[in-house]
Image (tube, helix red, strand yellow):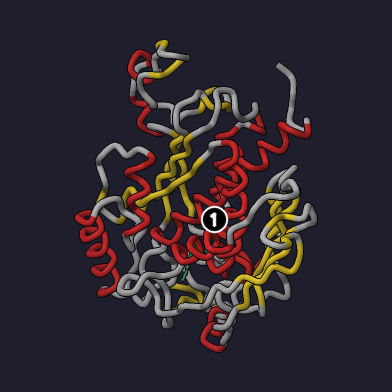
């Protein structure tokens, strides 16, 4: 079991070839309306899209075992689970001897003495369905505070969306299979994915996430910084290899006079740019919080790769068959949204129950 949060905690369990994956969500107040259609809609965004995704389409039917009664939270621990239907591990047996480059096999075999490779085990992207469920409930909670979160695909391979995106234009991405913001970008990004797939290869990309409605001062300091907590949680998503807030790495090339976001007064303190991605000192500066998460290409590819035969202790070759997405970026977008909602919900409740740090 793996746990995120302090006041609103989310505990994730399961493996890709176990009977179930699922989670526990604790600490949300009683009486919150939970719309199952919203959860279903968000799970649909995580499923592979026809044409650019794997044909492994498992039904994501969520079963709530406790914590929700008559469509509302009861204040008890919310326990939900999703049945795995595609659990044939026979094709994976060879990876115990010849680990897949780019996947978790090698370190997992070294760390866990009883480890037997079955799908992606506990490292599988399959578990992100539970993040989407818990994140969707958290989203319904934080919306009461006027906070909304959306992600979209900023780039896939060498195709990049170079336009500035605000919350509403990012919302358009929900209608496109690649989660890009326009039909033209969707076409280009689809082509990137198809080109990689034709080559028995895979491609990565960048998800951008925009949060609006955070009041100035929302967040924490040091290890409870808003950006530190978001980054820690987003990095836990399998295949995430980078994260930056606002202009991120670009800022290192600027002068302070170019990077600072100047203040002005217009019915309150405003900022005339958003180079910092909405976070100063670990707290919201009132701008939309904007960050980007880089996802590597899917490790399982059909192209022949070098590996090692762990029994013979000699070089070997491997080719991975089966159904793997040539690009996981479009599916990761809703997972990034979900985990962001969970971190924000936790922060809200920590501020309510006084368990957040207080020193000025
Ligand atoms: C939504 C999603 C789906 C994924 N699907 C696959 C897949 O089909 N095949 C694969 O090899 N990796 C897939 N991954 C990535 C692996 O789970 C991940 O690369 C692996 O566990 C190693 O972890 P790391 O990349 O974080 O180091 C997926 C990740 C996500 C977020």
Q: Which residue of the protein is positioned furthest toward the front in this rendering? A: 70
Residue positioned 72% across, 47% down in the render: 28
Is the residue 154 above or below the residue 282 in the image? Answer: below
Q: In which quarter of the image is residue 17?
A: bottom right
Q: Quadrant of residue 210?
A: top left
Residue positioned 71% across, 38% down in the render: 349
Circle 1 residue: 237
- Residue 228 or 29: which is nearer the viewer? 29
Residue 2 location in percent, x, y?
A: 70, 57
In this rendering, would 242 be left or right of 338? Answer: left
Estimate how packed mark 1 is, as few (under 14), some (14 to 19) or many (20 or more) residues with alpha carbons within 10 Å.
Answer: many
Q: Quadrant where the N terminus lies?
A: bottom right
- Residue 122 or 306: which is nearer the viewer? 122
Q: Quadrant where the C terminus lies?
A: top right
Asked if one can make out residue 14 in the rendered structure from this viewpoint, the answer is no
Label 1: element kind:
loop
Residue 182 location in percent, x, y?
A: 25, 52
In this rendering, would 58 be left or right of 178? Answer: right
In this rendering, would 116 be left or right of 238? Answer: right
Q: Specify whether tag 1 is near ligand 1 (CB below 8 Å).
A: yes
Residue positioned 43% across, 54% down in the render: 295
Residue 279 location in percent, x, y?
A: 51, 28
- Residue 141 or 344: which is nearer the viewer? 141
Is the residue 323 above or below the residue 129 in the image? Answer: below
Residue 351 location in percent, x, y?
A: 71, 31
Number of callouts: 1
Asked if one can make out residue 283 in the rendered structure from this viewpoint, the answer is yes
Residue positioned 35% across, 31% down in the render: 250
């Amino acid at each position: 079991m793996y746990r995120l949060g302090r006041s609103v905690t989310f505990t994730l369990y399961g493996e890709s070839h176990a009977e179930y994956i699922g989670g526990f969500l604790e600490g949300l107040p009683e009486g919150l309306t939970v719309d199952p259609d919203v959860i279903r809609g968000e799970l649909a965004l995580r499923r592979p899209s026809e044409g650019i995704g794997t044909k492994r389409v498992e039904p994501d039917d969520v079963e709530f075992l406790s914590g929700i009664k008559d469509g509302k939270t009861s204040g008890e621990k919310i326990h939900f689970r999703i049945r795995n239907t595609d659990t044939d591990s026979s094709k994976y047996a060879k990876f115990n001897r010849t680990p897949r480059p780019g996947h978790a096999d090698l370190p997992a075999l070294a760390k866990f003495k009883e480890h037997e490779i079955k799908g992606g085990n506990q490292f599988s992207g399959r578990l992100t369905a539970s993040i989407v469920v818990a994140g969707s409930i958290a989203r319904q909670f934080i919306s009461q505070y006027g906070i909304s979160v959306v992600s979209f695909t900023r780039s896939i391979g060498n195709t990049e969306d170079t336009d500035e995106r605000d919350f509403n234009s990012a919302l358009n991405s929900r209608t496109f299979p690649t989660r890009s913001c326009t039909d033209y970008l969707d076409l280009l990004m689809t082509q990137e994915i198809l080109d990689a797939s034709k080559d028995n290869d895979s491609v990565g990309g960048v998800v951008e996430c925009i949060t609006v409605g955070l009041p100035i001062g929302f967040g924490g300091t040091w290890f409870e910084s808003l950006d530190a907590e978001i980054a820690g949680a987003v990095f836990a998503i399998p295949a995430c290899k980078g994260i930056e807030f606002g202009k991120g790495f670009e800022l290192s090339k600027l002068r302070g006079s170019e990077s600072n976001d100047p203040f002005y007064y217009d019915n309150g303190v405003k900022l005339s740019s958003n180079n910092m991605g909405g976070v100063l000192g670990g707290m919201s500066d009132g701008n939309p919080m904007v960050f980007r998460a880089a996802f590597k290409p899917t490790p399982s590819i059909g192209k022949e790769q070098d590996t090692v035969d762990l029994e013979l202790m000699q070089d070997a070759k491997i080719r991975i068959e089966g159904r793997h997405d040539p690009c996981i970026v479009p599916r990761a977008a809703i997972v990034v949204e979900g985990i962001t909602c969970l971190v924000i919900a936790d922060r809200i409740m920590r501020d309510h129950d006084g368990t957040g740090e207080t020193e000025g």
